[in-house]
Amino acid sequence: MAKGRVVILGAGPAGLAAAWKLTERGYQPDVIELKPFVGGMAYTIRSDGYLWDLGPHRFHSSNPAIINEIDKLLGDELEKRDRKTRVFFWNKMYDYPLNAGNLLKNLPLYVAGLSFLDFAATVVKNKIKPSPDDNFESWVVNRFGRRLYDIYFGPYTAKVWGRDPRKLSSSWAAQRVAVVDLWDLTLRTLGFRKGDNNFHHSEYKDLFYYPRQGVGRISEVIAEKAAEGGARIHLNARMLEVRHQKGRIAEVVYEQHGKTHVLPCDYLISTIPISSLVRSIRPEPPEAIMHAAQGLKFRAMIFLFLKLNKSQVTNDHWIYFPDPKVIFNRVSEMRNFSHEAAPHGKGSLTVEITCDIGDEIWTESEEVLYEKTIQGLVEAGLFKREEVIGHFFERLPNAYPSYDLNYEGNLAALIYQLSSFDNMITGGRQGLFRYINTDHALEMGFCAAQEIANQEIGTKVARVGDAPVYFG
């Protein structure tokens, strides 16, 4: 017998994980999902013998319990891989994370020398008068020097986020820069430092797991388990309103196939963008809260999926392209994740183009985007134009939370407002506006189920993935 009416917004890894674990505790939740499929941003497109993810997805975790759960769930579907990633700039490939020896070998000698001297000068200067880490640029310059920042970190960050890095929070750098500083990088290259670096910065993980039929299998199998337990997953369903009374969420209104439905609920778990959730609440929150919701921005993404008459382009899982003259910023090769990702003798690439909804890239014709992308890939030497045998586009409006200098204040205001409802839980990358990985999203879902089952709302989910460490 169901113990209470639970409504879950979003059928990504976090929402589905919550639904699955709730069914094991006797609940029969309703999951509302806008798309016609489960998985959120971690779903897999399957067509004509090809598999495509929305960008490169690696499943890894520092929490063995999460790995064990998914390993038991997928069994021999889950395979181990050793990550290989590089950066292409100045017409050469560089290891990623950056490697001091690789930089010395590939950069012009005078540039490499000046970069290391610049870093040494930065260290001395900060010993005398420390420079604050008050934005992305200052955080990186303090750890790598101005020259390396200007060569790689600055251009790539400005390109991906479409903003001056000085207007991005330093907390973004702590989570997304894969090495601590140039000194740490040098010591590791020489073999003098291994393991924990005592800089409150986690190791870059080379080993990862990947399902043979795409990362979407994780969500699909969890959805199957949840449905077997009594969860109802409503696809193609648009959430319209979240109604509350007396400090509690009372019901959720959604539209599906042209009909409006009302779901009473005793508990609400939301994994949709937190700003969208706040805007859907009725009666509406105060004007200041609505203004804060408007201030939280997500970066959009356009994906170009290429079919190639070539079995393999490189042996990289993905390659970064920081050059601002190149329209795309990252390319991943699915066959290197799974041998089942393309038909025999064929290959594929997933190309990512970041933008903002409504900007000149988002509104550009697909013909122009395609031509600019192919030109850049051919010039990088990845393939010949005639080797492209097919392509298609996908768009993702809310891909990445944008950590501008105001996001922490805006987010805090929304979290405080939502905490006034004693039966609501928010989680997931979009639900908490936190750039987390799939393992964190799953753990948040598991924790949300525990909070409801144990009547401990607000005690577990927000703690997952909140450390200022690297999340790569």
Image: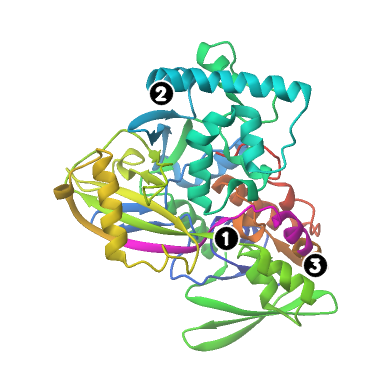
* Residue at the image point whose x is 38% and y is 35% from the top: 89
User: Can you give x and y, in whole percent of width and height, for residue 289 in the image?
Assistant: 76, 70
Which residue matches tag 3?
417
Task: Return the residue at label 1.
Answer: 298
Q: Is residue 166 above or below residue 198?
A: below
**471 or 252: nearer the viewer:** 471
Magenta span: 393-413
How far across and how far down the image is residue 361, in percent? 41, 62
Q: Residue at x 57, y 67 (%)?
A: 231
State which quadrant residue 353 falls in: bottom left
Q: Amino acid at mark 2?
A: Leu
Quadrant including the C terminus: top right
Judged by depth in the image, the label closer to the viewer, 2 or 3, is: 2
Identity, as a three-letter code, of the amino acid under mark 1: Phe
**Horizontal placement of 466 versus 53: left or right?**
right
Placement of 467 over or under 277, stated as above or below: above
Q: Between disc 1 and disc 2, whose residue precedes? A: 2
Q: How far apart are the two marked residues, 1 and 2, measured between alpha carbons?
A: 34 Å
In the image: residue 319, left or right of residue 143: left
- Residue 373 covered by magenta stretch: no
Name the spot of residue 236 as percent of width and height, x first.
47, 75
Instruction: Residue type at mark 3: give it.
Output: Gln
Q: Residue at x 48, y 88 (%)?
A: 258
Mark 1 or mark 3: name the one nearer the start of the chain: 1
Please give the label number shown on residue 107.
2
- Mark 1 touching mark 3, by CB under 8 A? no
Q: Nearer the viewer, mark 1 or mark 2?
A: 2
SS category of the residue bearing label 3: helix
Q: Nearer the viewer, mark 1 or mark 3?
A: 1
